[in-house]
Image: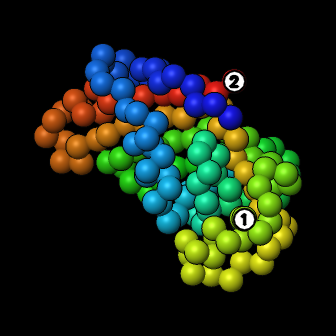
Amino acid sequence: MNIPEPQRARLSGYVQPGKLLPWAWLDARMGHARNYWITTHSAGFPSSRPVWGIWRSPTLVFSTGSQIARNIARDGRVQVNLESADEVVVIEGVAEPLIEQISPETWASAYNEKYDWDMPANTNGVYVVNPTRVLAWLSDSSGLDRGATFSNSATEWRFS
């Protein structure tokens, strides 16, 4: 999957012309993150849960055996967020069972190395998020910049 050209994010009227964030900035944050928040569509309301996963740019591979799996079976549309509100990454995409994207051995090896865990080399309960839209921006948590950091860094990538 190719990375599209970045563009100014279409968010609110607060976004101003500014410097676009490079994909490498997003790549670094996603690769080093320990926890990823997955939001799925549940019975009438959104449902968010933290998961562990492996970033394989531009996709996230994660495992779950919880309500997330049941929700994805009904509706694969998901949103992925990192924990930081100062270095924001939001991925909108479609989650599907991991079948052929990477081998079970590659998945388990990367997972075990990152989390010091003993993940078996199979893909039961393992999903891959294919992005459709990715947003990223910086924010000054003090608020002293009156939103200038956000409005001048908001970046969007649209995947087809």
Question: Mark 1 or mark 2, which has the lower sequence index?
Answer: 1
- Residue that carries the numbered disc 2 in the rendered image: 160
Q: Is residue 144 above or below residue 80?
A: above
Q: Which residue is mark 1?
A: 106
Mark 2: few/some/many CA within 10 Å (<14, 14-19, 20+): few
As helix, strand or loop, the secondary structure at mark 1 comes to helix
- Residue 147 on image: x %, y %: 24, 32
The answer to whether residue 77 is seen in the rendering is no
Q: Is residue 83 left or right of residue 56?
A: left
Q: Quadrant of the C terminus?
A: top right
- Residue at (59% x, 54% y) in the render: 55
Considering the numbered disc 2 on the image, is that residue within a helix, a strand or a loop?
loop
x, y (%) of residue 20?
36, 26
**How many numbered circles are shown?**
2
Q: Disc 1 versus disc 2: distance between alpha carbons? A: 27 Å
For the point 85% across and 51% down, the residue is: 100
Tell me which amino acid carries mark 2. Ser
